Amino acid sequence: MSIILCVVIGALIAVLLNYLADVLPRTRKFSRPVCHNCGHAFTLREYLISFRCPECKTNPSKRYWIVLIAGMAGSVLLALFPLKPLGYWASLPLLAFLALVMIIDIEHRAVLIETDIVGFVLGIIYGLIIHRPLEMILGGIGGAGIMGVIYFGGIFFNRVIGTIRNQKMSEVALGLGDVIVCGYLGLIMGWPHIAGMIIIAILLGGVFSLWFILVKIITKKYNPFSAIPYVPFLILAAITMFYLP
């Protein structure tokens, strides 16, 4: 496949992802994008071509450019190294969807019910393509079950620490959205591969957390109970599993 075609496809998908990441957390539906600074409703031309708000002159966020560059680069890499056993075209919808879930979680610390529904539909479709039905079902149950145990364990830990410190702990390591995401990722991974995916996600999260803590200590902004979005580690671990023997 032509590299130029891959770049164009990646750019188009990136534009779509940026649009969905702009409107879904705000309206939960396909709607007109607005400036996050002044609320100006963009026309199609303003949103796609002007690259800044005509009212307050605010430039697009850094996320816009990061997603655009990552989309083009990712499309080229996917053409060279498609997900096994999927090819380039079959991999695109799955990776684009997972990228959207990751972007929203990083930016808003939220997992939307709308994306959860799409996630389970895609989970069943790709699960049946890759695995036998029983493996797919057990993967979904295993993914949600294992992450559910970790989720409720985190709540219990917070209550214990809150009791010891005599204060209410509002931050939790994981959210219920993480459990749901792990459920439909389990449909895609199948059993027992979902267990390996969770282990990789925990390792990735641990390495990032260590780096995050060191940076916060150096900048003197360390909070021992600050939380980080966990969905990106689950998704990165799922992608990693496709390339493992």
Image (cartoon, rainbow, N blue to C red):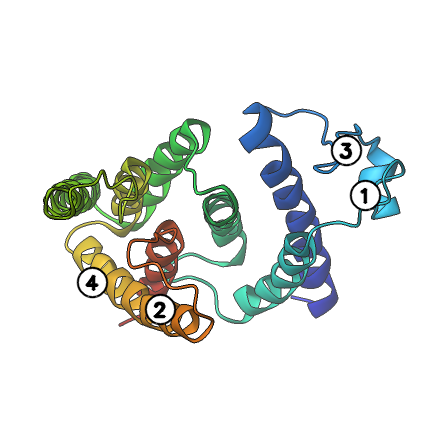
Inspect the image, locate mark 3, and give the three-letter code of the amino acid beneath it: Cys
Distance from Cα at disc 4 to Cα at disc 1 = 40 Å
Quadrant in the picture for the C terminus: bottom left
Residue for badge 2:
213
Q: Residue at the location (62% across, 32% down)?
A: 23
Rendered location of residue 117, percent (x, y):
39, 28
Judging depth in this view, the residue of 174 and 188 nearest the camera is 174
Q: Look at the numbered disc 1 and give the secondary structure of its residue.
A: helix
Q: Earlier in the sequence, mark 3 or mark 4?
A: 3
Q: Earlier in the sequence, mark 3 or mark 2?
A: 3
Distance from Cα at disc 3 to Cα at disc 4 = 43 Å
Res. 121 visible in picture: yes
Q: Which image quarter: residue 56?
A: top right
Inspect the image, locate mark 4, and give the three-letter code of the amino acid beneath it: Ile
Judging depth in this view, the residue of 135 and 74 nearest the camera is 74
Q: Earlier in the sequence, mark 1 or mark 2?
A: 1
Does residue 243 lie above or below 14 as drawn? below
Distance from Cα at disc 2 to Cα at disc 4 = 21 Å
Distance from Cα at disc 3 to Cα at disc 2 = 35 Å
Rendered location of residue 154, percent (x, y):
17, 46
Q: Look at the numbered disc 3 and give the secondary structure of its residue.
A: loop
Rendered location of residue 157, percent (x, y):
13, 47
Distance from Cα at disc 1 to Cα at disc 2 = 38 Å
Residue for badge 1:
48
Q: Is residue 242 toward the left or the right of residue 193 in the image? A: right
Q: Earlier in the sequence, mark 4 or mark 1?
A: 1
Residue for badge 4:
199
Distance from Cα at disc 3 to Cα at disc 1 = 18 Å
